[in-house]
Amino acid sequence: MEIVVVGTGYVGLVTAVCLAEYGHKVTCVDIDENKINKLRDGISPIYEQDLEELMKKNSKRLRYTTDYMSAYKDAEVIFIGVGTPEKKDGSANLSYVYAVAKQIAESVDHSCVVVLKSTVPIGTNDKVLKILNDNKKTSIKINIVSNPEFLAQGTAVRDTLHASRIVIGVDNEDAEKVMREVYKEYDAPILVTDSRSAEMVKYASNDFLALKISYINEIANLCEIVGAKVEDVAKGMGYDSRIGDKFLNAGIGYGGSCFPKDTKALHWLANMNDYELKTVKAAIEVNEQQKLRLIKKSRKYYDNFEGLTVAILGLTFKPGTDDLREAASIINIPIILDDGANIKAFDPVGIENFKKTMKYGDVEGLDRISYFNNIDDTIKDTDICFIFTEWDEIKNYDISKFRKLMKRPILLDGRNCYSLSDAESYGVIYMGIGK
Ligand code: UDX
C-alpha cells in the first residue's frame, strides 16, 4: 500500500520503517530539513537498535521528504506521528497534531484514511476529524482512525515488528478494512473498538505501568525501614501471573518521554472532567520523591558536597537510548552542582545529548562537570558515586574497583546494579533501593 507517515521521531520513524519491512511503500514527511537529509543519507536521527539496518534493508520502499503536498498525493493511508509534548499545566500540547490535520485536509484531493499514532487525550480523534472535514477542499471522504503506539525506546523496532497488540479505534467498516490490510502481515492480536476507547487504552496502559513502578518503589522504601529485600519481594510477587514479574524493578523512579507526560496528561484530563484520579496522582507524587531518594541518602555521609568530587554513572533515562527526557540525572546533577561539587560523569551514549540539554544560564556550574568514556577514569579519586542508569557496562563492572579507585568508596546505586553482600565483601559502602 502507499502510506505516508508524518513526523520522524521515535513513533513516526519506527512505524514507517516497520511498515516498509512488511512490504508497504512508505513516505516519511518532516518539516526538519536536517533530519530528512540525514535520513536520505541512511542515518537515523535517533539512537535505536536495529533501526538503521532496517532503513538500509528497505531503502527501496522508503522515501524521505519535506514536501508534504507531493507526499500526500497518492497516499491511501496517512499516519500522524508527531509529538504531543507536555504543557506547563500537565496537559498535552496538540498544536502539532492539529496543524498536520489541517495541512492534510488542504492538500489531499482523494479519499483516504488518516491514522493518529501519537498519544493523544481522549476525544482528540473527534476533533481531528472535524478539522479534516472543515478544511477539505472537495467532497472527498477522509476517515480517521485511532491507532496508538506501544513501543518502548531501546526495543522500539522489536516492539513494533512483533507488537503485543494492534488497537484500532474506528467508527466505520471501510476504514477498518483498510487498517486490517495495513496490518495484514503483522502477527499480533487486533482489537477493534471506538476511537475514545482506543485513545484510553494507551493512557491506561502507560499509567498502569507507571503506577506499578511507583508501587514497587514505595514497597522498596518500606523494605528499607523494616529490613526486607525488595528484589526478593518483587520476585515472590512476580510468580503470581495476575501480577506478573515485569516492571517490578525498584529504583530511582521512572523517566522518559511517556510515563511522566502521560500520567500528568490523564490526571489533568480527569480533573478537567471533575474527577480526581487518585491512583495516578499517587504514582506521580511518589515518582517525584523517588528521584531525590539518593541525594537524601547521601546526607548520611556528607552534609553538603562543597569541594567534593562526585562520580555519576549513567545519564540517560534508561539503558539502550540516548534520550535524557525526565532522567534522574537531569534532576540530580543541578542539585549536586548547586551544592558546590565537581562532577565526573560517564554514559556510553548520552553525553552529547546531556550537554545539549543542560544549558549555561539555566544551570549553574556546568563547567565543573568533566565527561569520561570509561568507568575507571570516572570514579578515580572521587568522594561518592551515584548510579542513575543500569547500562550493561555499569552492571558488569568489577565492584572491587570502587574500593581500589575511589578516594572514599561510597556507592549509591539508584538501579540496584549490585548486590549488597558483594559490595560489602569488597569493602564498598553501598546503598541501593529497597535493600
Ligand atoms: C514506555 C512504555 O514501556 C511503552 O509501552 C510506551 O509506548 C512508551 O513508554 P519507555 O518510556 O521507552 O516506554 O521505557 P520503559 O522501558 O517503559 O521505562 C520507562 C521508565 O521506567 C524508565 O526510566 C525505566 O528506568 C523505569 N522503570 C521501568 C523502572 O524504574 N522500573 C521498572 O521495573 C521498569
Image (cartoon, rainbow, N blue to C red):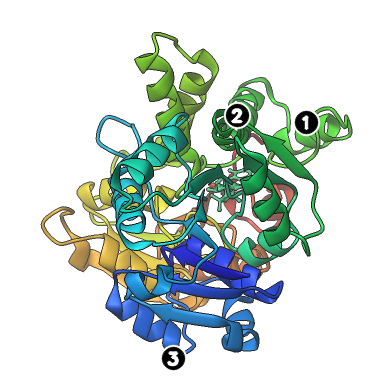
Looking at the picture, which amino acid does disc 1 mark?
Val
Task: Give the residue at x 17% y 59%.
Answer: 365
Q: CA distance from mark 3 to mark 2?
A: 40 Å
Q: Is residue 90 left or right of residue 50?
A: left
- The answer to which of marks 2 and 1 sits earlier in the sequence is 2
In the rendered image, the residue lying farthest to the left is 361
Q: Earlier in the sequence, mark 1 or mark 3?
A: 3
Is 177 positioned to the left or the right of 84 in the image?
right
Local crowd size for mark 3, using a 10 Å CA cut-off: few (<14), some (14–19), many (≥20): few
What residue is shown at x 30% (from left), y 72% (from top)? 370
Residue carrying label 1:
233
Of the numbered discs in the image, which one, if any, rests on residue 41?
A: 3
Q: Report the quarter where the N terminus lies.
A: bottom right
Q: Residue at x 48, y 48 (%)?
A: 141
In the depicted structure, whether residue 9 falls above or below residue 295: below
Q: Amino acid at mark 2?
A: Ser
The label nearer to you, 3 versus 2, is: 2
Residue at x-position 54% and y-position 35%:
199
Secondary structure at badge 3 equals: loop
According to the image, label 2 marks what residue? Answer: 197
Residue 290: x percent and y percent? 47, 34
Q: CA distance from mark 1 to mark 3?
A: 49 Å
| Mark 1: few/some/many CA within 10 Å (<14, 14-19, 20+) | some
